[in-house]
Amino acid sequence: MIKKSIPHIFTSLNLIAGCLAVYFAFSHQFNAALLFVLLGVFFDFFDGFFARLLGVESELGVQLDSMADLITSGVAPGALMYQLFLLSGVKINDYTLNISSDISIVLSFAPLALIGFTITLGAAFRLSRFNLLEEKLSYFKGIPAPANAILIMGLPFVFQHPNLVVFKAYLMNPISLMICCTLSIFLMNIHWKMFSLKTNEGMLSFLFPVLLLIGATLMFLLYGLAAISGTIILYVVLSSIKYLFKI
């Protein structure tokens, strides 16, 4: 019983980390939100790792894992994108819902900012399609939902870095944010091949992970946490080169 519970414990930690990331995103504590998404991704890796190691993979674990991933890699980046829309100048409006003569509910939200939650929808479709795969592939089709979440959660640090602040005017506006949401959904659900860090297709298969590691290290040295989104973009570029030129 204890052995079967170990993967579920890590999945539950992923779910809790995702819930905390959502809370901190809505509280504009973007550092904490990123931290808990990264923790969620960490726990997500180990729930599958221990399930395979201990031979206790189950349908319940698969479904629970998807539920946790939807929160950490779907709702959390959607919540953060909603806040970025607000910071870009989108206004919150009050809408009164009259239920009866003496009961009314005031709803305060920014309708345009709700576009941020299309990322959540994109992640839901991505995770559902992944669950339906009957064959185990040595690569990903589209970027994994956790990678997309890290890409989105890293955006505030791009806007805050003194050497990248020039991009803020171009990126922190509703049109650019809508484009980011569209690209996010597109990248998660396209059928482009993206290399896996766990692949073992010969010595040449290690070339692109090594290039990714070198590029990520250089970006972190230059830009700190602002390099988080850049690392995911580099991953997409390297994957496109690898499979476009069949390297």
Image (spheres, helix red, strand yellow):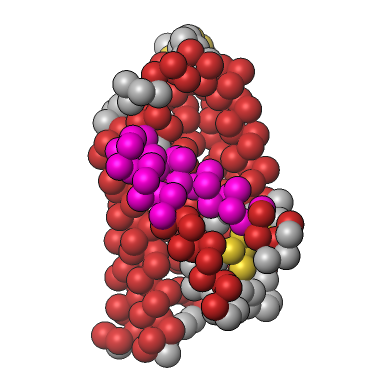
Q: Which residues are magenta?
A: 214-240
Residue at 33%, 43% (x, y): give it. 220
Residue 169 is situated, as x and y percent measured from the top left of the image, at 48, 13
In terms of image quadrants, where is residue 239? Answer: bottom right
Q: Is residue 226 above or below residue 59?
A: above
**50, 164: nearer the viewer:** 164
Q: Which residue is painted at 67% across and 78% down in the image?
A: 135
Q: Is residue 89 above or below residue 13?
A: above
Identity of the residue drawn at 59% across and 40% down: 184
Answer yes or no: is residue 50 visible: yes
State the residue in front, 221 or 148: 221
The quarter of the picture where the C terminus appears is bottom right
- What is the magenta segment's predominant secondary structure? helix
- Give the vertical position of 47 relative to 77 (above or below): below
* Residue 178 percent coordinates (x, y): 61, 25
Closer to us: 184 or 199? 199
